[in-house]
Image (cartoon, rainbow, N blue to C red):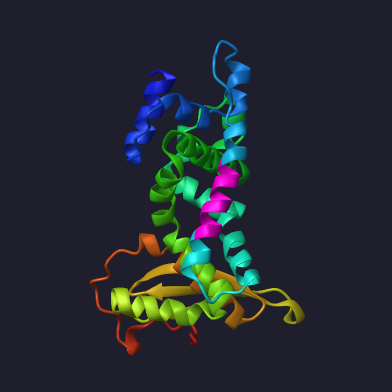
Amino acid sequence: MDELTMVATFAERNELVFRDLNLLREALTHRSYLNEHPEADWGDNERLEYLGDAVLDFLLADSLYRRFPQAREGELTGLRAALVRRETLARLARQLGLGEALLMGHGEADSGGRQRPPLLCAAFEALIGALYLDQGLTGVASFVMPRMEAELAAAQAEVLDKDPKSRLQELAQGLLGVTPRYRTVKAEGPDHAKRFTVEVHLGNAVWGVGQGHSKQAAAQQAAIDALRRQAEWAPLTEPEPPPDAQPAARSFS
């Protein structure tokens, strides 16, 4: 399978329609691939990464400004920072299967490059840059903004609401008809520096895990994790177990 065919397969899988597949091929090309294939007559994705970073910043700044008219400048900056940080963009890249689609040298791939967050983040930004050149800001917005909804819910709880547990409860009850349940599953470290791990259950499944130096802090992080995964929530048709059937691990609200 040649490079353009591989690129076209990635585009089809993610419902991306490029007028110029050469742009997408460049966005999916890590520099290590060109080191091993000097005959390639196209560039790596670093210039597109630069462009995509700027496009994404502007698109999110504009969207957040319009969506949160009462938010202060610092709050808008915090929301945007949460949406464009490395972990967020790497997570979106994984959802697209971007790591597996990258044209990459054998050495880089063998060392775990396809799973490395900085590389995934850069590839996602390069994809945005290519999409901008191919379809303009409207095309980028149509592709990016629906995928940002779950991330925005988590960022909003973290930056604006200051109470991720309340936001998770509101969404879980409204969308799924269930109330989140929290369980402390681990406590480790000395008493003066104890670290807790908490899971949050929606229905009978774990949808978020968090850690913190108090149970409350760990539960807040678990709620943020669950909010971030909102796009993955499947309809929960099984009823929640009655209180006397819940695990014996300690829980709290």
Q: Position of residue 120 (x, y in %)?
A: 55, 42
> Going 49% across and 45% down the picture, which residue do you hit?
93
Q: Nearer the viewer, residue 28 or 201?
A: 28
Main secondary-structure element of the magenta-colored stretch: helix
Where are the magenta residues, as a range?
Answer: 52-62
Q: What count of labels does the image hold?
A: 0
Q: Nearer the viewer, residue 108 or 229?
A: 229
Quadrant of image for the N terminus: top left
Q: Is residue 14 left or right of residue 151?
A: left
Q: Quadrant of residue 125?
A: top right
Q: Position of residue 96 (x, y in %)?
A: 42, 44
Q: Position of residue 14 (x, y in %)?
A: 35, 41
> Going 41% across and 80% down the picture, which residue do you hit?
169
Residue, far top: 39
Q: Nearer the viewer, residue 15 or 164?
A: 15
> Going 61% across and 71% down the picture, which residue do you hit?
75
Residue 60 counted in the magenta span: yes
Report if residue 11 is visible in the image: yes
Report if residue 197 is visible in the image: no
Q: Is residue 5 above or below residue 214?
A: above
Residue 118 counted in the magenta span: no
Q: Is residue 100 above or below residue 190?
A: above
Residue, far left: 237
Q: Position of residue 39 (x, y in %)?
A: 56, 10
Residue, far right: 192
Q: Is residue 35 left or right of residue 125?
A: right
Q: Nearer the viewer, residue 157 or 239?
A: 157
